[in-house]
Image (cartoon, helix red, strand yellow):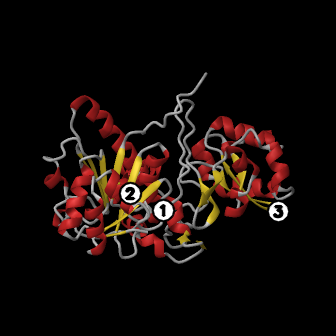
Amino acid sequence: MAVSGRPPLEGIRVLDFSRIIAGPNCTQTLADMGAEVIKIEDPDGGDDTRRNSGPRVGVHSHFFLAFNRGKKSVALDIGTADGQAIVRRLLARCDVLIENFRPGVMKRFGLDYDSLSAAFPKLVYLSVSAYGQTGPLSDRPGFDPVLQAESGMMSLTGEPDGQPMRHPLSLIDTLTSAHASTAILAALYARRDTGRGQRIDLALYDVALAALGNAGLYYLSSGESPPRSGNTHMTSTPTAAFTCADGLLYMAVSNQKLFGQTATALGHPEWIADSRFATPPDRTKNRAVLLDMMNAILATDTRANWMKKLRHLPAGPVRTLGEALESEETRSRGIVRTMNHPAIGDFRVLDTVYRMSDTPVRTEVPPPLLGQDTVAVLRDVAGCDAAEIAALLAKKVVVGA
């Protein structure tokens, strides 16, 4: 069957004021889906992540490369009246605005939803903040690790007798970006019927609490926090990291059927009838004994050999990032791919996870240089003539690459 060849969000234009991860990862997803994303950046340095420490690829930080492909960069000072006027001219031809300033910042510039909604009634306006637009903490800044601490997520992580641990990845930011994309698509779908846009208030704190999922319900159902369980699981046994002859193997055996298959694969089908392991609660109660028995068996062979025997079960080697990103299965899925940037040459990125049969989801546009598209966007979207653009450049309201 022939595919349409048309990206699903072709024709949607997004004005993106976001920085760091949650907003930029959302708008990168929208760009992958075909939306035109215009990234508005401070002329003085742009997105904070452009200057991050760590590996660089040419002029770009690895951090900026991770979340900004497919976008146009406009370096625009929104603290000036001229800059705010340009934003309004751009919004006349935009469908979505995304910002992740603290509540009140966009209002100071006259660019908050209440100030814009009458003039742009079809605008979908997404605000990402740490604690939401209302509530006792709404004025506070917040970053992912702090939200991991405050939401209780951190209390679940770490060894039972150790300190709570934060996850090194920005899980709350990443989850927030996914919710942001979903909310924007829902609002655009609703606009099709109502003809109206709307305001979306998305808080990292809310996302962190919602992400507690079954752990949150453990507390809400019992009044007690689930025990911190390290590499095991609060209610599922045997779910743990096991020591093989050449490294660690992780298994997640979450139900009765899988336990029976695991016991058989390890050469001990008698465990199925053992009263200590008869039910999930029994296995959790006798976790230490069962894990010791499994470790003794798994230590007799390599991970690769065990994976041949355990292929039908939820098990996998505990890998380094390099082992995972350079693996055969990663290559086969195409999740790591090469892009080309005119200023830095070829570089590798983590690609979109969406595989859609009719509408392609992928961009070939690399992350932009600061102000790379300023002049073109002012001309083609805002409708500025050459004299206006020259005046804005001269006053440093805008900066071009």
Q: Nearer the viewer, mark 2 or mark 3?
A: 2
Q: Position of residue 385 (x, y in %)?
A: 28, 57
- Asked if one can make out residue 375 in the rendered structure from this viewpoint, the answer is yes
Rounded to the nearest angstrom, the CA distance separating label 2 from label 1 is: 13 Å
- Horizontally, is 162 left or right of 323 in the view? left
Question: What is the crowding at mark 2: few (fewer than 14 residues within 10 Å), some, or many (at least 20)?
Answer: some
Mark sitting earlier along the chain (2/1): 1
Q: Which mark is residue 368?
A: 1
Rounded to the nearest angstrom, the CA distance separating label 3 from label 1 is: 43 Å
Q: Which residue is mark 3?
A: 246
- Look at the picture and state if 135 lies above or below 354: below
The residue sitting at 36% across, 40% down in the picture is 185
The residue sitting at 40% across, 66% down in the picture is 371
Q: Quadrant of the C terminus?
A: bottom left
Front residue of 243 and 204: 204
Instruction: Give, as a three-letter code, the residue at label 2.
Output: Ala
- Asked if one can make out residue 203 in the rendered structure from this viewpoint, the answer is no
The answer to whether the residues at label 3 and label 1 have Cβ atoms under 8 Å apart is no
Q: Secondary structure at mark 3?
A: loop
The residue sitting at 59% across, 72% down in the picture is 58
Q: Which residue is mark 2?
A: 376
Front residue of 34 and 153: 34
Q: Position of residue 264 (x, y in %)?
A: 79, 39
Rounded to the nearest angstrom, the CA distance separating label 2 from label 3 is: 56 Å
The residue sitting at 53% across, 63% down in the picture is 65
- Horizontally, is 268 left or right of 398 in the view? right
Q: Secondary structure at mark 2?
A: helix
Q: Quadrant of the N terminus?
A: top right
Mark sitting earlier along the chain (3/1): 3
Q: Secondary structure at mark 1?
A: loop
- Look at the picture and state if 51 lies above or below 332: below
Q: Nearer the viewer, mark 3 or mark 1?
A: 1
